[in-house]
Every structure is written in C-alpha cells, then in structure tokens.
Image (cartoon, coloured by chain):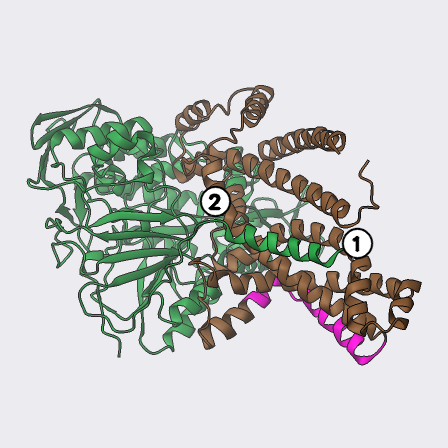
Amino acid sequence: MLENHKIWIIFLFLLVLTGCSTEDTTPKSHDASKATNGGELVISSVREPDTLDVQKTTWVDNANVHLFDYLIGRDMDGSIIPGLVKDYTIADDGKSWTFHLRENVKFHSGEELTAESVKASMERFIKQSPVNFLAGPITGVEASDKSTLIVNFSEPYAPFIAGLTSIYLSPLDPAALKSEGDKFGNKPSGTGPLLFEKWIRGDSITFVKNEQYNWGPDDAENKGGTNVDKVVFRFIKDENTRMLEFNQGNIQIMLDVPPSSVKTLENTSGVQLHKLLDNGLTYLAINNDKPLFQDPKVRKAINLAIDRNQIVQYAMEGYAKPMYGPLSPTIPGYSEKVEKMAEQMYTRNVEQAKQLLHGAGWSNVNGNGVLVKEGKQLSIELLLTDEPVMQRIAQILQNQLKEVGIDLRITVQDDSTIRTNESKKMHDLILWQYGWSDPDILYILFGKDIPTRLFSTPELEELLIKGRQTMDEKARMAVYEKVQELLVTESPWVPLFARERITAYRDIEGFKVNPYKKIVIQDIKLKKQQ
Amino acid sequence: MLRYLFKRFCTMILTLFGVSILVFFMVHLIPGDPVTYILGDFATNEAIAKLRSEMGLDQPMASQYLSFVSGVMQGNLGTSYITGQSVWEEIAQRFPITLKLGIISLLIGSCIGILLGVISAVNQNTWADYLVSIVSLLGVSAPGFWIALFFIYVFSFQLAIFPISGYAGWHSLILPSLTLGLGSVGNIARMTRSNMLEVLKQDYMRTALAKGTRYWKVIFGHGLKNAFIPVITLIGITFGNLLAGAIVTETVFGLPGMGSFTVESIVKRDIYTVQGLVMFLGMMFILTNLLVDLIYKWIDPRITLE
C-alpha cells in the first residue's frame, strides 16, 4: 500500500533537487530611458564563436573582433590605413617587411605594446593558427628596437597584406598569454576598444568599455573607447524568437537578417536596415575529376542553363547581386572587364546550352526531356546544406537545368559531410560559398596543394603562384585579371551571386559597418527612447 | 538489497561499455572529422595531415578507442577541441539547466496528467472524459516548437510576463517547462485513466465507500495509490524522453542547456565532446531507471527486487 506522505516526499525531493544549485538571478534590465552616452548595447548573432582565441579558429565575426586592434586597417572603400602599425616598407626583393608601430598603446592588462609583444603574437600565430598559410613562407620575425618589427620571407609573398589587415594577426596581450597559455580563449585580452567580461556559453558574451583606449583607427569618428558602457552579444538560433526579441526592443542590432524577414522589418516603424555586399560569392562547385565534367562543353552548358536573376529574385528576395565572374565587386582585384565578358558569355541561353550538350554527344531519345548518352541518363547530384535559402536555390536550379535536359537530384548534407565528400571527390555539384578579402582566395579554391581544389591547368597554377609573388599592387592585380579571364573561358565552376548581408537596427545612432572589418562599434550611441 | 545493488552495478558497467562502443564508432564512422570543421575553407593537405596527427586522429581505431575508454574509467570524459574546455566543465555549466527544465516539466506533466486521468476515469464515457481525451490528444500531437512559439508570443511578447529567450533564473524556465511538460500530459493521463478504471472495480473501493468515507478521499486515498505504480514507470520513461525533447525547446527558447549543446557538438564534429556527453547521458538514464525501481520497492513493499 502506498502511503500518501511518500508521494509528498518524492515531490518535495524533486523540488529540492531543482533548487539546490546556485544561479544568477539578476534579471536582464531593459531600462526604457537611457542617456545618449553609456548604457548597454545588445547585438544578436546567429553563430556563436567556438573560441575568443582568434589564433585557434578560422571563424571570426563581430562577436570576437572588438577585443583586438588590426595591425593595418582598411578604410570603408578598401584603401590601406594605419592601425597599430603607423607605416611599413617592403624591401626591393620583396622578401622583407619593416613595420613601425604606434607608440603609447596599452594592452588591457596595462602592458605596453612593443615590437616584442607583436613578435610573440605573430610567432604563436605561425605555430598554431589554422589559417597560418596567411604568413606564407615566413623565415623569421625580429624586433629590431622597441617599436620596429622586421618580418623576413624566403620568397616574396604578397597576400601577407591580407593577413595583416585581418584580425587573425592582431597582437594578443602578453600578460594573458603568460597566465592562460593555451586557455587564452577563456580570458582573452588585446588592445581593442572593448574588454572581455564574461561568456555564458550557449547564451551570450559580455564586453565592457576600454576606458584607457584613445588610439581608434581612421574609420572611426570616436577615437576613444566605446560610447556605450557594455556590449552584449546574444546567440539566438531560432529565427522567430530573435524577431520577437528585436521587436520588443531587447536587441538593438540584429545581424544576418534572413531575406524572408526583411519585408516585415521594412514595415516596422523605428527599424532601419543596412545592406552590405559580401566579400564573397555563392557558387556551384563542379567536380572536374569526373569524366562527365572534363568536357568543357558540359560545364559551359550548365553555366548557360542558369538564370541568375531568377535565383536572386525568388530565393534571395532581391538581396544579392547576380555574378558571372570569379570575384565579387568588393574584393581587391575585381575586374569589371572580366565580369562584363563573363556576363556576355553566360547569360542564360537554353538553345545554346542544348547545342553544346548535343555536341558533347548527349541526345534526346526517350522523349521524357532528360538527355541520354550511351544508354545513360544525364542525371547529376547537387549537395547543399540545410540552410533554407540554399534549399530554395536548389529547387530553382533543378527547374532551370531540366529545361536543357539535365536531371538534377538534390541531396542535403551537413557542412562537414559535404567537405569530406568534396575532398574525396565524391560529388557532382555542390552549392557552396566563399568569403575572403584578397584575390588570393582563388589560390585557396584552385591552388595546387588544396585537397578540395576545383580545377587546374599548368597555366592557372603558374599564374596563382605569380599572384602570390608579385609585390607591386598594380602588376599583381593584372595577374589576377588573367586568372579571372582563364576561369571564365574554362568555366570550371558556376558563380551565382554575391549576397547582401542585412543588418537591422533600432534605438541607436551612428551605426556603420566597415566592409573589410566589422561594425564600427566605437561610434554607436544609444538613443533616448520616447 | 546489497546483492541487488551489486548486480545492478555490474549490468550498468556492461551497458555503459556497450554505449561506449556504439558512440565511438558512430562518431568515427560518420563522414567528416573535426579537422574538416576546424580548417574549413582554408584546408591544405599539409595542414590537414598536421592537425590530424596532433589530435591523434591518424592513430588506429582500436588504440583511439582504448584511450577513450581508459579516460572514461579514470573519470575523464575528454576535452572539447573546439572550446578547449573539458567535457566535465561543459556539463557543469549546462546540465543544471536541462535537469531543472526536465524536473519542472515532469512535475507539471505528472500533476496535470494524473489529475486529468482521475477525472476521466471517474466520469467514464461522459463529456468530461471525452474532453480530457481531446486535450490529451492535442498535447501529444501539437509539435513542441509550435507550442513554444505560441507561448512566447502570448505570454512574453504580448503580455510581457516572462522573458522571450535566454536564461536569467527561474522565470526563464517556466514557459519552456510548460511546453515540454504538455507533451507528456497525454500519455500520463491515459495511463492513469486505465489503471484507475481497474482499481475502481475492486472490492476494497466499494467497502471504503460503504463505510461512508468521503468520495474524493476514497478516490485519491485508496484508488490512486494502487493505480500509481505503472504510472511511475511511465514517469521514469518520460523523464528520459524529456531530456531528448529538451533539444527543440532549448533551441526555441535560447536556453544554454545540454540539448542544444549536443546538437551543436555533433554538427561541429566535436567527437570528444559528443562521446563524453553520450556517456554522461547514458549514465543518467541508467540511474533514473534504478531510482524508479527503488521507488517501487519503497512505495509498495510487496514488490521484490530480486
């Protein structure tokens, strides 16, 4: 028989169990009346960083850059501006770079920025960063005096500038490196306008204003630390939840607004939208190792079968720019000439695509619309991730390819699986994207020691190496123009469009984004709410 | 009793051993490894080979498995190479939230479920009975994410009683627990109803009523007690399901719990973390089942555990 008190004991026990751990019960205050300076800025982001140690990851975005300063900056239009490095010179043989550092810059720990500390960070980067190829064939780093740093290479390496203007090579606080070592990511510290306060994994990261900061770069009007006292990044995966939080005013800046939510936000009063073209493209990767795709006629036919405008209009709701050439307009080295040529060659032309396929020996025998050669149907598989936008694109592509007689099978896989299939060359087509701020991205896509490389010819290989070794900016860009022309004529892949990154914001002033870095966080002020 | 516990302990070790083999081969056989995630777009052959050997991924499977198991035996669940934290640290941060969520949901689900079950049994085949059936059906079939969004919209957005998302103490857990608990109401109510109907036919119920004891006292005092044992089994099973259901709920409400974390670790191919988490959850399941069995014995001394 069951005694009543026993049931109560069970229930009480469960209640005690839930209550017997300490917790932070400070409610998140959202005070409705704030002064223009100070206050707490809340930014929502979809993807949480894996670590705040920028030398341990390939993924950096707004949530992990503001602790650090760039060695060399880029202005809003992409031109080089001083960062922690005042100026630099490159030796005539292109094998040695000399940097003069800014004085009176302090790390968050109070230690002064010296050539020694920059050297220590750089050496750590070379040793352990997953993107240490950015340092190229480096032979050594030396601090010749307190504020002069010399970097030597075994051969000229122009893309080093891409590393210097990225956050990966930002100087890290030597004090934190000493005390935390490998766990630097748990207590990250640099010279940037924000200090690290706390990270609740899966929920949020909180930063506070760096009071001693006064070395802001040229692209920020405010050279001091942030106007706001606190910046909180919240990671909310669910799209609907994020929209509700934003609409209630708990979030001032919403990053990566999906195209499908833009219409709603445009009609919400007090909300402003910011659009920025990506330094990258969404493209179709073609497996050029397969006999089917070794025939350029087939590759070109696929390219000609696709109507990019339709994709941009229906899948991206118009928030993208159709692209025909290899580089997006914001990447240095982009060539309008090549883009125009590519557009002329590959604007949709169903008849021409069909002719090319017939020329490659494919013919329509069954009358079901799918082409056949030697008894085999022209049926190819497209791999893509489960991002809703990608799935819409895939359906449009399926329809467009059907019109020229190609049967497209759609397979959704996760990122890691696709990468593995790509490096083992198990795929036909992949709906993929890249992003980088230097034309050397073409080496990362087509270079000779890249396992996932899309395509190669001896000429292309040679040009990509030459692009890395040509130190003169103008001459270097001329090399990349050749690379782009070659890629357009061979059509080893199908560029589709450059995305527009959409950010929504409200209740703030001074919002702007540097296309080559991130949000200019120092200039943002909270508006007094009516 | 001691002998029984020892036996249970031995089967637990065996079960966990099985779990370890399963999870190890699952995470090692799915395509993609941590290296593909870490290096992403910038993977050169050289970098891949270097990182794989640093992480010990180029070792033979058997030796990798042995080092994993020997780690677990020493209480070391491994270290996430993505966050750099030990799996225990990660669990310590996240498990309390999921545990609270699970327990509150369980309390909500069982209280409502048992009450509805009793009501519908006592009023068999009346409108009340049918109404409970419909409510149970709704609870079982409405998808969690839909209920979650409905609650958020009404209680957080329109009425602003609860926070929309994130974790800031108790009031953050109320809506997620309701969402999760409602899913289990239906099953518990149906189970309670059928057991209760059995019990209502028993002689001792009639005797108690004939003696003039108040009706509801008989129902809850004499009836429910005896209908309770199978319901406890179900509650035990439900608790396991709640931990699984937490994945969706935690994602929608933006709670930094175990559910959302497990999914994330799988996507990132954070194999050591996935292995550690699965071992830990396996242990939790086994312990919950043991607890349920012990509670039987404690509630109904007629049950023998041998």
The subunit letter for the residue under badge 1 reads B
Residue farthest to the right? B203
Q: Is residue B126 magenta?
A: yes
Left or right: where A178 falls relative to B151: left
Residue at point 20%, 32% (across, down): A174
Residue at point 41%, 24% (across, down): B50
Residue at point 32%, 58% (across, down): A277
Residue segment shown in magenta: B125-148
Q: Quadrant of residue A77?
A: bottom left
Magenta span dominant secondary structure: helix
Q: Please identify the quadrant where the N terminus of chain B is shown.
A: top right
Q: Colour of chain B?
A: brown
Local crowd size for mark 2, using a 10 Å CA cut-off: few (<14), some (14–19), many (≥20): many
Q: Is residue A165 magenta?
A: no
Above/below status of A214 relative to B121: above
Select label 1 or label 2 by which is in front.
1
Give the percent coordinates (x, y) of residue B28. 58, 31
Chain letter, green in picture: A
Residue type, label 2: Ala
Left or right: where B238 falls relative to B43: right
Closer-to-camera residue (A381/B296): B296
Residue type, label 1: Pro
Give the percent coordinates (x, y) of residue A461. 35, 31
Q: Quadrant of residue A142?
A: top left
Q: Which residue is mark 1?
A: B230
Q: Which residue is mark 2?
A: A285
Query: In the structure shown, which secondary structural element does the residue marked by tag 2 occupy?
Result: strand
